[in-house]
Image (spheres, coloured by chain):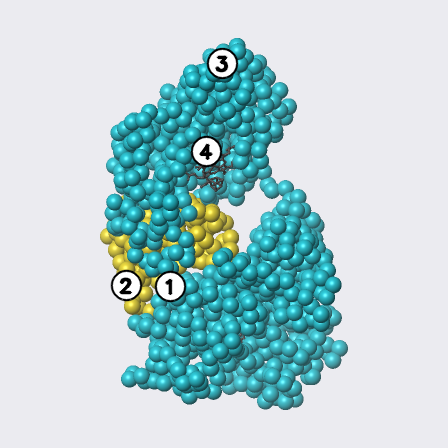
Chain colours: A yellow, B cyan
Amino acid sequence: MTAQLEAPHTTAAVEWHVVCPVAQLLRERGVAALVPGAGQVAVFRLADGSVRVVGNRDPFSGANVMSRGIVGTRAGSPTVASPMYKQVFDLVTGRCLDDEAVALPTYASRVHAGMVFVAVAAR
Amino acid sequence: MSTSSAPQPHGAPAHLVVVGNGMVGQRLVESLRARDESGRWRVTVLCEEPRPAYDRVALSSWFTGASEADLCLVPEGFYDGDPLLDLRVGESAVAVDRAARTVTTSTGAVVAYDALVLATGSYAFVPPIEGKDLPGAFVYRTIADLEEMRAHAAGRRVGAVVGGGLLGLEAANALLGLGLETHVVEFAPRLMAVQVDEGGGAVLRRHIERLGITVHAGTATAALRPGGDGSVARMEFADGNGIDTDLVVFAAGVRARDELARSSGLTVGPRGGVVVDSACRTEDPRVFAIGECACIDGGVYGLVAPGYAMAEVVADRLLDGASEFPGADLSTKLKLLGVDVASFGDAHAASPGALEVVYTDQVAGTYKKLVLSDDAQTLLGGVLVGDASAYPALRGLVGGPLPGTPEEVLVGTAELAGPTGNAVVCSCAGVTAGEITTAICEGGCADVPSLKSCTRAGTGCGSCVPLLKKMLADAGVQQSRGLCEHFPELNRADLFDIVRVRQVRTFSQLVREHGTGRGCDICKPVVASILASLGNGHILAGEQAALQDTNDHFLANIQKDGTYSVVPRIPGGEITPDKLIVIGEVARDFGLYTKITGGQRIDLFGARVEQLPAIWRRLVDAGFESGHAYGKSLRTVKSCVGSTWCRYGVQDSVGLAIDLELRYRGLRGPHKIKAGVSGCARECAEARSKDIGIIATEKGWNLYVGGNGGFTPRHAELLLSDLTTEELVRYVDRYLMYYVRTADRLQRTAAWVEALDGGIDHLRSVIVEDSLGICAELDAAMAAHVDGYADEWRAALDDPETLRRFASFVNAPGEPDRDIVFVVERDQPRPARPEERVLIGGPRLEVRK
Ligand code: SRM
Ligand SMILES: Cc1cc2nc3c(=O)[nH]c(=O)nc-3n(C[C@H](O)[C@H](O)[C@H](O)COP(=O)(O)OP(=O)(O)OC[C@H]3O[C@@H](n4cnc5c(N)ncnc54)[C@H](O)[C@@H]3O)c2cc1C
Ligand code: SF4
Ligand code: FES
């Protein structure tokens, strides 16, 4: 079990939602998940085993497909390429590296007791 | 002062105090620090906000997940340990004594200066109405404002924005994102009155309303009234109407923060702003003002680009330069709530005699206007709403002749020539075409990132990036030979040889030993294809799964709405009635759109990921297999009906097409591979437009290679004539394997043959005369492919681990994606268009059983 903790990016109180066993995630591949308060998210497991979570909606096509993109790196930062029109997004910041005006929402995540958790702002 | 404050190069550094660490103040410090090599200036920066400079232009992205660190403008470590820089966060200037040359700060400290720069920006203007200070009323200027807005919005329902300009619409977008029912109240009769004209405003309004935002134009806000909890509950309009709202954002304009100048007796402009000359200097030679707080040439600019220009001027002046403010380009392009809006040059046709040409497309929701000189020869400006793709090119043409008739330019048929010389390419950073060209030709910039760091072009709003790319291409920049940043020196053929000769089995090993990083969407599919060409089991086995493009990963073709299409193989286009019926039944039962393709088979569209296995199960049970429509692999071998039925046919083209399709099915290559077989020279199979074209003769077959339809059509060239079937298969085997080994990524055979040194003669010498001595290897490789073939759909169905990936949601595998919405057209489903989705309003239209 890896206990990896990251600071949630919101300052408001957050709710953690369990998504799936981390063992179910292929390395360098994503899955989509439904998370209350966030809608569809894309959950990625990186080569080093860490987990990153961004919105599943591709801002360029409007389709919910980000989880199906190819994971990689650009200048060392982990990225995912939209499977639709191939724009690349930074998996840490959510920023689109091909169009600075565009970003995916990002969500804090942690792996605890073998399960992946995703944080959303408490409402 | 002839910069009397400027210290001499070898003396003790003089002291510069910068009031304000906003976008412009920070730019000044960076620019000065970069130019002041001999350390003539020591700089103290007073920063009122609780955090150092951040990207205010991108403020709204804070709501969509950008963190404070993402927005931060201060390069890492910039202020740390530099003895010449002192950033005082949370400390503001409260008074300036010009006679004593000191600034008093909020901590009571008194700081002496040799030069002072005011970079205090603006504050949001709040109209003096009753209730403006109630809890729940906000402005939209700082990260702190956004934090408070978000906290207040939690659990509340309605929000209203006062002001329908650029900022107001951005705020409205943020309220929508916070899940509030959103209203925009604008005093002027249209939205974005500063940027767009009446026609553009109307088109914009329709777009905005379609998003569910209620627009109240021509409406004045009169008062805010509290509810039971003491915070805003109602907004009243001057006409007596009003709306219930829980949150109000004032975005009704900004005013320069010139209070320090006023209290220290400096002149301010008629509508505010510290009056400065073209050197950004006030009447006191030791005091400068830059950015939004400055009034220069009689104007105050609310955009960052003119502010940056002022920062550069002052950095230069502090070092004895003679720069002057060049004037501002007020062109803007934005994507507001998904709608492109751009205005440039004389957008309101204010020049004497200016002509306007307007083109509106009600259906597409676009509005385009060009402003021309009175002789209609010179472009003066324009407005684009709904589609601003022509903006970068048009902006570069302002002041010059139109490259076509106005109609051609507006509907986008004219070749828009690239800008040259002094035309501004990047208005955010004020970079001209000439500077970009210099950076490319003399500065060695070979890609957009290097242009950004070299010229700063493209570092602001990003709208000039497409133009930068085009200028690089036009300058004939040789892209490096490598595939991508992970394999900077190796192309596909190199990688193929490494994998083959060293028997590399995984991407991880390859990138560790021969590349850097963890790959990307360019190199991973290439390596996946190489591994597949060399026979490494199922393409979704082990680590290979993570390398595949979405099409290969789901063994189907992704469509615009995220659903997939399913194409069973129908070799040679021949199909039994029973199998046709099965396809019809599957399509009917799963509600799939059905179409006969240009490749003589049938495509079934609109399958959601979680439906794919069930669809394949039915097809596989009926004897179908994957048609690899998703792969860079053999597609179809098209055939005409041939000698079996046709009165002119001289050979059995259907029989040969089926044999070839079954032989090469599943072969993965640099790009897709298509073939055609015609039963006589009438060529009904269009074989000469294929990678492999075969045409029957009295004596056997003629073999043509390197044909292409598609983007750059090319007729296949005759390689060999009158072959027996056995000979034909042997040469096609070798041709394909030689191509698979040596072509570039995404290079069809047509381009590959053209690029071969010696062209088709070289090819003939290699695969017929064996000039390279590799024919035995090529033959063996093809034999291994043919023996190793297995249907990918069946293999996936047989493996529970793989099947589990065909789930819509990992935590709700059977749940469909509710955003996929179909409508019925000509008795079949198709994806709903955005405007239809609004009409349908969420619930699925039932077209599936
Ligand atoms: C379905 C079909 C159109 C139709 O309804 O008839 C089609 C559909 C697509 N074609 Fe095609 N092409 C289809 C026949 C053709 C043909 C005609 C032919 O094969 O006889 C051509 C011209 C011949 C040629 O390839 O040289 C053709 C030239 C292209 C090209 C341009 C290739 C080029 O070299 O320039 C692309 C783009 C690419 O592959 O990069 C393309 C790409 C596509 C893609 C894969 C676009 C995409 O990435 O989403 C389409 C998706 C298919 C799907 O099922 O979702 N399609 N496409 C045809 C499927 C044939 C089949 O049964 O497999
Ligand atoms: C939401 C939003 C979107 C925008 N979008 C765009 C856009 O797309 N394009 C564009 O060109 N512009 C845009 N702008 C405008 C742009 O942000 C400003 O033009 C730019 O920030 C001006 O820079 P500045 O340094 O002059 O002022 P600011 O960035 O406001 O910085 C001034 C700083 O000085 C501080 N200060 C004030 N008084 C004192 C004092 N007495 N002591 C110490 N510190 C003090 C303030 O707290 C502030 O931090 C946008 C603005 C907002 C709010
Ligand atoms: S021609 Fe274009 S639109 Fe038509 S199927 Fe081919 S790729 Fe799609
Ligand atoms: S025009 Fe905005 S970054 Fe170049």
Q: Amino acid at mark 1?
A: His
Numbered circle sitting on residue A9 = 1
- Few, some or many C-alpha atoms within 10 Å of disc 1 (few <14, some 14-19, many ≥20)? some
Quote the CA–CA distance across marks 4 and 3: 25 Å
Q: Is residue A36 left or right of residue B295?
A: left
Judging by the rendered image, the residue that carries numbered circle 2 is A15
Q: Residue at x 51, y 76 (%)?
A: B189
* Residue assigned mark 3: B650
Residue kind at label 4, given as amino acid type: Gly
Amino acid at the residue labelled 3: Val
Task: Please say if the residues under marks 2 and 4 sit with CB atoms less than 8 Å apart.
Answer: no
Spatial separation of the CA atoms under disc 1 and disc 3:
72 Å
- Identified at 67% across, 46% down, the residue is B475
- In this rendering, do the residues under marks 1 and 3 share a single chain? no
Q: Where residue B291 sits in the image (x, y, percent)?
A: 60, 74
Q: Earlier in the sequence, mark 1 or mark 2?
A: 1
Disc 4 residue lies near ligand 1 with CB under 8 A: yes
User: Mark 2 — on which chain does it sit?
Assistant: A
The residue labelled by disc 4 is B598
Q: Residue at x 55, y 73 (%)?
A: B193
Q: Up-down: is A88 above or below B9?
A: above
Query: Which quadrant: the N terminus of chain B?
Result: bottom right
State yes or no: discs 1 and 3 in contact (Cβ < 8 Å): no
User: For the residue labelled by badge 4, is the local secondary structure a helix, a strand or a loop?
Assistant: loop
Q: Quadrant of residue A39?
A: bottom left
Distance in Å between CA atoms under marks 4 and 1: 50 Å
